[in-house]
């Protein structure tokens, strides 16, 4: 979606990469061969480099100039007043920004300011203007955006079509369909395991996987218990130890997705604790579960409070305790938690 414009920033100086080319042509046309008889530096100047070539490399967030550029110095995204724009000055939405960044191989950060905070990078990337704000204020603005991003990613991994949905509709859809998707996936994994087991039951039994006379629910319980202790610790060189997956774990990994298993356990715990999961990704729900249990352990009065409010209470107590133990200031504490 295109919106208001700003004056486009001047492109960064092009880089010479190993002498292969001296400037970037951001078209997607094929590289043109040098003309006959043109050699040396003249030949270099005739090379056109397609934009896709640069997508094979990482990109750099230049915090001093408030731009993101590719390896050849071409500006990809520029920031002004907390908003994102492309090189032409057209506003870029947060989702469009994410799609652009995903095309490249990672991102580094450059700044000449030794006191520059990574939070400023996170803020700009989340569409939050960090100027004049404390680290705590920046974090409070970033987190909802970050969580929504994680939720959308979760929806995409589950095959949900959320392209035409509003943010609130995405939250509702994920909350309604996530548990069913996870349970169906695990049930399908159990069926596949049972079919494979029938082909050579003895081999599975020797690996510690015995499905004899077990119901699907009992198989699920067995699998979950096996994943509680998935590896063995063996001596390595120089007194170090290495964790090696058990044979049973290696077999289960062929059928089950551990991320889905952890998600199922997290959602089950949330139900048990009465956590409101709407609008939260699995990682956040896990944090809320922990906070709810911690609040009970600490004897906090949580009667009538939402799970989000309880989480804030617990995190505040843990923050105070951490600052007392480490001597950190509030700004230092939040700077360490992007």
Image: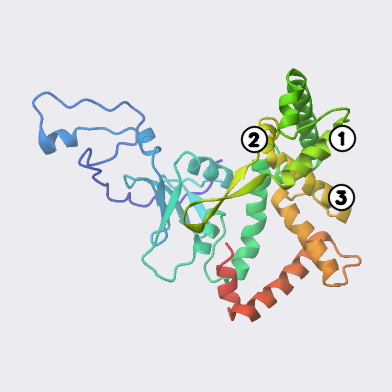
Given this view, does label 1 or label 2 mark the residue nearer the observer? 2
**307 relative position to 57: left or right:** right
Residue located beneath label 3 in the image: 271
Name the quadrant containing residue 294.
bottom right
Vertical position of residue 269 compared to residue 160: above or below: below
Name the quadrant containing residue 45.
top left
Secondary structure beneath dot 3 equals: helix
Q: Residues within 10 Å of mark 1 (few under 14, many from 20)?
A: few
Q: Residues within 10 Å of mark 2 (few under 14, many from 20)?
A: some
Q: Return the mark for residue 45.
A: none
Residue located beneath label 1 in the image: 217
The front one of 157 and 7 is 157
| Inter-mark Cα distance, 2 to 3 | 30 Å
Name the quadrant containing residue 123.
bottom right
Does residue 164 appear in this view? no
Residue at the farthest right position? 303
Residue 120 placement (x, y as % from top left): 51, 63
Which residue is located at x 50 percent, y 62 percent? Answer: 118
The front one of 242 and 127 is 242
Residue 268 placement (x, y as % from top left): 83, 47
**278 relative position to 29: left or right:** right
Kindly check if marks 1 and 2 are in contact, taking CB atoms under 8 A apart as contact.
Answer: no
Which residue is located at x 87 percent, y 56 percent? Answer: 273
Which residue is located at x 47 percent, y 45 percent? Answer: 90
Residue located beneath label 2 in the image: 250
| Inter-mark Cα distance, 1 to 3 | 18 Å
Does residue 18 appear in this view? yes
Which residue is located at x 62 percent, y 68 percent? Answer: 137
């Amino acid at each position: 979606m295109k919106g208001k414009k700003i004056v486009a920033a001047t492109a960064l100086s092009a880089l010479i990469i190993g002498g292969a080319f001296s400037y970037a042509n951001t078209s997607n046309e094929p590289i043109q061969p040098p003309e006959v008889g043109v050699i040396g530096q003249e030949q270099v100047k005739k090379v056109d480099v397609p934009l896709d070539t640069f997508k094979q490399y990482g990109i750099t967030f230049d915090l001093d100039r408030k731009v993101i550029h590719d390896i050849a110095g071409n500006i990809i995204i520029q920031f002004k007043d907390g908003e994102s724009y492309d090189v032409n000055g057209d506003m870029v939405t947060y989702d469009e920004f994410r799609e652009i960044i995903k095309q490249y191989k990672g991102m580094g950060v450059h700044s000449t300011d030794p006191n520059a905070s990574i939070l400023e990078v996170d803020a700009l990337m989340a569409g939050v203007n960090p100027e004049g704000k404390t680290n705590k204020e920046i974090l409070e603005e970033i987190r909802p955006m970050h969580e929504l991003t994680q939720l959308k990613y979760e929806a995409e991994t589950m095959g949900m079509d959320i392209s035409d949905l509003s943010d609130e509709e995405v939250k509702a859809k994920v909350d309604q369909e996530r548990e069913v998707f996870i349970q169906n996936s695990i049930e399908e994994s159990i069926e596949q395991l049972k079919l494979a087991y029938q082909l050579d039951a003895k081999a599975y039994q020797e690996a510690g996987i015995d499905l004899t006379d077990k119901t699907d629910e009992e198989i699920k319980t067995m699998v979950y218990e096996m994943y509680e202790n998935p590896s063995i610790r063996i001596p390595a060189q120089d007194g170090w130890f290495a964790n090696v997956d058990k044979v049973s774990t290696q077999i289960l990994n062929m059928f089950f997705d551990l991320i889905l298993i952890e998600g199922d356990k997290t959602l089950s715990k949330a139900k048990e604790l009465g956590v409101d999961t709407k609008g939260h990704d699995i990682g956040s729900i896990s944090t809320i579960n922990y906070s709810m249990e911690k609040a009970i352990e600490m004897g906090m009065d949580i009667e009538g409070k939402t799970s989000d409010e309880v989480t804030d209470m617990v995190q505040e107590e843990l923050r105070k305790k951490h600052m007392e133990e480490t001597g950190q200031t509030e700004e230092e504490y939040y700077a360490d938690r992007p």
